[in-house]
Structure formats: C-alpha cells, structure tokens
Image (spheres, rainbow, N blue to C red):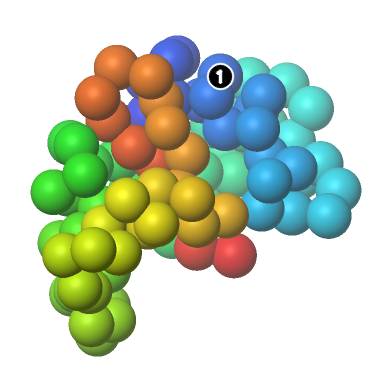
Amino acid sequence: MFDDKVVSCFLDNQLQLFPEEVASTMEEAREFLEDSEAYVVDGIEGVVEYFEEAGIDIEEDSEEELLEEAEVFDIGDGRYLIVEA
C-alpha cells in the first residue's frame, strides 16, 4: 500500500509528529504506517477532503495551513501522507 517514496518520507520526517522515532528502518516504517491510521492523498484537495471528512470545517484561506499540520507529510511528488497520531 505504501511505496518506497512514501515510507522514506515518513522515516525522514517522523519527528515532526512524534517526540521520538517510531521506526528506524524502512521495514519498521512501512509496518508502522500499515498498522496505523495513515493515508496517501493526491494534492491539497485530498488533504482538504480528508480533514472535511474528519469533521473539521475548512475555510478556503486556511487550506495552505493544513499542509503545515504535524500529521501531514509532503511526499514531494504532489502527494501527501497523513498519519493520525
């Protein structure tokens, strides 16, 4: 479900969400993502849709602020990984 680019992004940036590392290898990171509430979405529209489905009211001006949330990881190819802590 999670390709190497997604797993690598999480592994490299996991401290933006957690106070200490939850994984130290690609395999551990992949297992963590598979076991947790993690989603890959396309573009900011996918991030907005995720938060709206979670019941969070999003104003158009705050869409960019969503990308700064700790649980949102920019994969770098137009996709975003969202990990619930």
Viewed as shown, does residue 37 lie left or right of 62? Answer: right
Q: Amino acid at mark 1?
A: Ser
| Image coords of residue 39 (percent x, y) | 33, 48
Viewed as shown, does residue 76 lie left or right of 26? Answer: left
- Position of residue 83 relative to residue 23, above or below, is below
Label 1 crowd (10 A; few <14 / some 14-19 / many >=20): some
| Image coords of residue 22 (percent x, y) | 76, 45
| Image coords of residue 74 (percent x, y) | 42, 32
| Image coords of residue 62 (percent x, y) | 30, 64
Image quadrant holding the N terminus, namely top left
Viewed as shown, does residue 43 lie left or right of 5? Answer: left
Viewed as shown, does residue 2 lie left or right of 51? Answer: right
Image quadrant holding the C terminus, namely bottom right
Quick one: SS at disc 1? helix
Residue toward you, 5 or 2 = 5
Q: Which residue is mark 1?
A: 8
Residue toward you, 81 or 35 = 81
Please say whether residue 74 is visible from this viewpoint: yes
Residue at position x 41%, y 25% in the image: 75
- Position of residue 6 relative to residue 38, above or below, is above
